[in-house]
């Protein structure tokens, strides 16, 4: 029997998924890496390691057959410390003895990991997390300038393979960056039947979940909640990189009598909220494929989106309804879904069917396994 393929995942903020005592620092990208690591660790054909930031945990621990390695501390104030972080990252990757390294998104680390894999002849798979990462000049995107942007561009060019979330991202990569990619859709495990709630059992009218960042457009949410003062809104979201902006949004949210604001929550807590909601609302200006949409889908919760339409899932009769950037239209659609039981039931079933067809974790992870085997020359 051949040795298992050694797969190392890198996700800097993912440790809280392994140990909840360290708070909630993860988002959708970290959650996807965590899910895929868990699925690969169940398969004897793979040995799985996971590299995260040093947040005070032991240097190496084991969770669900995954070795989790502590790398560098997040804060680096000068170039000496930044170089030290690079050395620490390389040392930790080397200690994991990988055949394959996977990372997700456009951090500086993507280019560093690609360089490590080129230097030591390992395979590197880059997973796209946002549509903006697929445009021709990522350095033109706010937050993509400087070394972060150039490092990511290097990773896109030199990775052994690039995995996109959607067909739209795949097309963008091909036309804008002349880079081929494989589509691996975000996957979520199925809910236990006891977690499903009927329409009459749902006590949240509208649910909104996202980081409190400007591109997530919480101002539109606030405006819709003010107009729909008779509906109950629940909002889950941690403050993002702009502390001042986030605190201002929290203050506005807390001022609305029909809105309950909750900070970051664990996956199981979010699952419970999704199953209690009549409508899931997304107001983002731009995204990749939000994991919160998938969580809502598998709960059979109809979706309403103000701006985004990933892979055209909001065509008539599919998962939910698209607001065409018009807040008034979103308000009308929300009220219609809440007040019309037949319409709600129709979109509830379509929402669940979308998860069932495209986002079952066991199926998306199987595609990832097959691609790893294909690119490493192993046998499935």
Image: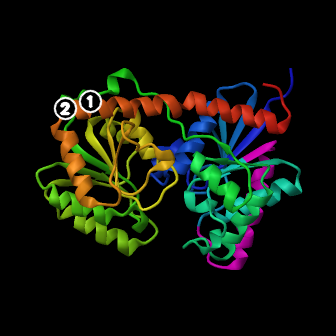
Q: Residues within 10 Å of mark 1 (few under 14, many from 20)?
A: some
Q: Is residue 238 magenta?
A: no
Q: Which residue is mark 2?
A: 341
Secondary structure beneath dot 1 equals: helix
Secondary structure beneath dot 2 equals: helix
Predominant SS of the magenta segment: helix
The answer to the question of whether label 1 and label 2 lie on touching residues, with beta carbons closer than 8 A, is yes
Q: Is residue 253 above or below residue 163?
A: below
Residue 238 appears in which quarter of the rendering? Answer: bottom left
Instruction: Report x, y in % for residue 203.
Output: 19, 38
Residue 326 appears in which quarter of the rendering? Answer: bottom left
In the image, 328 versus 249, the foreground residue is 328
Q: Is residue 128 above or below residue 362?
A: below
Residue lying farthest to the left in this orientation = 230
Q: Which quarter of the rendering shows the C terminus? A: top right
Please provide the residue range marked out in magenta: 75-101
How many marks overall?
2
In the image, 19 versus 310, the foreground residue is 310
Instruction: Report x, y in % for residue 206.
Output: 25, 47
Report how far apart the C-alphas of labels 1 and 2 lie in the structure: 6 Å
């Amino acid at each position: 029997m051949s040795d298992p393929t050694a797969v190392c995942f890198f996700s800097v903020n993912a440790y809280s998924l392994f140990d909840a005592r360290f708070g909630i620092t993860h988002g959708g990208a970290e959650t996807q890496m965590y899910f895929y690591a868990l699925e690969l660790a169940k398969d004897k054909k793979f040995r799985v390691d996971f590299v995260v930031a040093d947040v005070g945990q032991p240097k190496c621990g084991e969770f669900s057959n995954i070795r989790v390695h502590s790398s560098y501390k997040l804060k680096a104030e000068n170039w000496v410390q930044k170089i030290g972080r690079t050395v620490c990252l390389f040392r930790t990757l080397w200690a994991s003895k990988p055949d394959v390294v996977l990372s997700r998104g456009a951090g500086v680390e993507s280019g560093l990991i690609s360089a490590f894999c080129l230097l030591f002849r390992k395979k590197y798979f880059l997973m796209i997390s946002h549509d903006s990462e697929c445009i021709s000049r990522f350095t033109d995107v706010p937050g993509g300038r400087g070394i972060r942007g150039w490092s990511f561009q290097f990773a896109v060019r030199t990775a052994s393979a690039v995995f996109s979330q959607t067909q739209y991202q795949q097309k963008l990569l091909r036309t804008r960056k002349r880079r081929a990619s494989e589509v691996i859709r975000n996957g979520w495990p199925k809910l236990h039947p006891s977690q499903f709630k009927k329409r009459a059992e749902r006590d949240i009218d509208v649910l909104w979940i996202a980081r409190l960042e400007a591109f997530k457009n919480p101002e539109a949410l606030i405006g819709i909640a003010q107009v729909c003062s008779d509906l109950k809104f629940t909002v889950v979201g941690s403050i993002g990189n702009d502390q001042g902006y986030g605190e201002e949004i929290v203050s506005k949210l807390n001022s609305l009598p029909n809105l309950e604001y909750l900070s970051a929550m664990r996956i199981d807590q979010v699952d419970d909220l999704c199953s209690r909601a009549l409508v899931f609302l997304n107001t983002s200006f731009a995204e990749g494929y939000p994991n919160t949409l998938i969580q809502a889908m598998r709960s059979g919760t109809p979706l309403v989106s103000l701006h985004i339409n990933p892979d055209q899932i909001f065509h008539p009769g599919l998962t939910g309804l698209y607001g065409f950037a018009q807040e008034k239209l979103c308000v009308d659609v929300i009220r219609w879904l809440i007040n019309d039981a037949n319409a709600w039931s129709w979109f509830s079933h379509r929402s669940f069917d979308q998860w069932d067809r495209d986002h079952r974790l066991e199926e998306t992870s199987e595609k990832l396994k097959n691609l790893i085997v294909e690119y490493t020359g192993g046998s499935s």
